[in-house]
Image: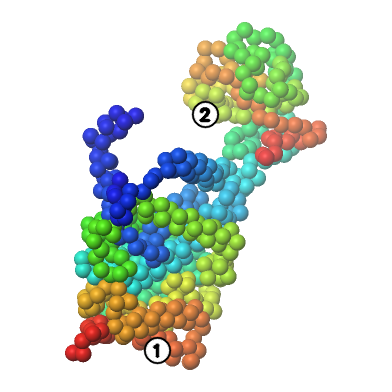
Amino acid sequence: MVDDHNSQKTVIDEKRRRFLVNMLSIAGSVSALGALMPFVSSCLPSMKSRADAGPMRVGVSHLKPGQQMTVLWRGKPVWIIHRTPEMLLELAKPNPDLRDAESKVPQQPTYAVNDYRSIKPEYLVLVGICTHLGCTPLYKPKEFYCPCHGSRFDLAGRVFKHVPAPINLEVPPYRFINEHVIEIGEEVL
Amino acid sequence: MSRLGDWINDRLPYRRLWKQHASEYLVPNNLNFYYLFGSLALLILCNQLVTGFWLTLFYTPTAHDAFHSIQSIMRDVNYGWLFRYMHTTGASALFIVLYLHIFRGLLYGSYQKPRELVWILGMFLFFLLVLEACFGYLLPWGQLSFWGGSVMTSLASTIPYVGDTLVLWIRGDYSVSDVTLHRFFALHVIGIPFCVLFVVGLHVFTLRQVGPNNPTGVELPLTQKIPFHPFYTLKDGVAALGFCILFFAVVFFFPDMYGYFLDPMNTTPANVLMTPDAITPLWYMAPFYAMLRAIPHKLLGVMVMGGSMALLLFMPWLDKSVVRAVKNKNRYAQIALIFLVVSFISLGVLGMQEITPMKLVLARGFTILYFAYFILMPWYSRVDKTCEA
């Protein structure tokens, strides 16, 4: 410390000094944390993004049995497939070749944890993104086949064993507004 | 913990640097209110860098989307309005602080030997920041952005022979367009900030080399010097907090400052086919704009405007006085400084208004007074207070 230019030495109150420094540090840290909040919050989705990410309604009455339609929801392809009675019969049978037959991994809402992974058996709603590395699988008569690395899923979106994909295809949150209209997605708070 | 400190110190001598620049950097004990503006300017510069960077996360630098992206920042992005207002208020705050900082230099003769280079580097910084503000103003792509940008870039056309080509080169197109917006964006976000940071470093370095001046203008003995830390670090800290109170009061309650910080004309998207009734620059360019309008000749007007800023560079050689501080100088010098301040402020007021014959006369008068401060200085600064000859 540099000597005071008075001839007497100044008496330093260490306790008070430490108290002041601590109080200032706490106040400073709280302020710094507070100042950080707008930066963090601003990088979360904006109001427009949240509005665009809200639910979308799709009419399904035009879908013939066996037909698939694809809509874009939150930038992702979502399939709606009108399954035939034959497909439903096949799905009802137990299949030992499935990795997660009972949908234990949380890739679907609770109302889709059943043999058909859907609310109404005739209509399958799936996010069409392979759970391996993100390609869009092809809709084949007996299964979904992903051309990128050969993953296969049954017609309820359940993944087969011995393929690269680890989990079932995702079922998005959805509900039936009425007989003919599905609303995909939920309101973003 | 101190072993870690030793390890770092052996490789990066932070302890020596701390002593040299803070805890044992001796500085006059009488530095007053006017000496706060340097560190305040640095604080605001940091604010501009941080909020400016943040804005580039959400801004789109194309003529088609620029205006809309800023509306999105204001309305859709969480806290977008806060960062946008911090950036615009920061720009005006920076110029307030800089004008006061420069005034301190004039008041206490800080530009005199051995601090001439500190002063010159400081003036370069001022020119750079004026450019930065001009480039930044185009980015919102509002009516004033576009038309102000057209006026500013056409200033270069006054240069004989190369003028028109120069304007074409600056704009990159046959009028201010999307091309101009792209390059002004790059200059505003990267080009100039890097230069500013570098010159700020040099400015502080050259100052540290000789130490600061003080309000008496006389070099003080060591017994009247105190270490920068803790005395001036804490004092500057208090000033920073006080500044933040004022700054955020503006940001939250009057961010457009009744049209001076954010002009309402600029809330209209740029329309190439419709010139606004009055194209005024923002308030901090108003004094120079008033001078430009006062001169009826195109090239001379630009030269006067540029000269009014450039003349400041020569202060160390214009001022022949043997003393530094204005309070120790003769009556002429003191009156001259008062006239300079009055002229500068009056020109600023006139620059924001429409021209009338009366105001034109006033603007010319004040321009002459402003220049008289500099041009007559070699004579009036030599008149000694005590001697007759």
Q: Which residue is painted at 58% across and 38% down in the image?
A: A75
Find disc 1 in the rendering and name its residue: B365
Query: From what the image shows, is residue B366 above or below residue A19?
Result: below
What type is the residue that disc 2 sits on? Cys
Residue sitting at the far top: A96
Q: Could you tell whether B100 is left or right of B17 in the image?
A: right
Q: Which residue is painted at 67% across and 40% down in the image?
A: A189
Residue sitting at the far left: B389
Can you tell which of label 2 and label 1 is closer to the viewer?
1
Give the letter of the chain under mark 2. Answer: A
Comparing B268 with B43, the one in front is B43
The x, y position of residue B148, in whole percent, is 46, 72
Find disc 2 in the rendering and name its residue: A135
State which quarter of the image contains the C terminus of chain B. bottom left
Visible in this render: residue A28? yes
Please give the label number shown on residue B208.
none
Query: From what the image shows, is residue B384 above or below residue A18?
Result: below
Visible in this render: residue B49? no
**Crowd band around label 1 with a 10 angstrom C-alpha radius: few (<14), some (14–19), many (20+):** some
**Crowd band around label 2 with a 10 angstrom C-alpha radius: few (<14), some (14–19), many (20+):** some
Q: Secondary structure at mark 2?
A: loop
Comparing B98 with B332, the one in front is B332
| Residue B72, picture quadrant | bottom right
Give the letter of the chain under mark 1. Answer: B
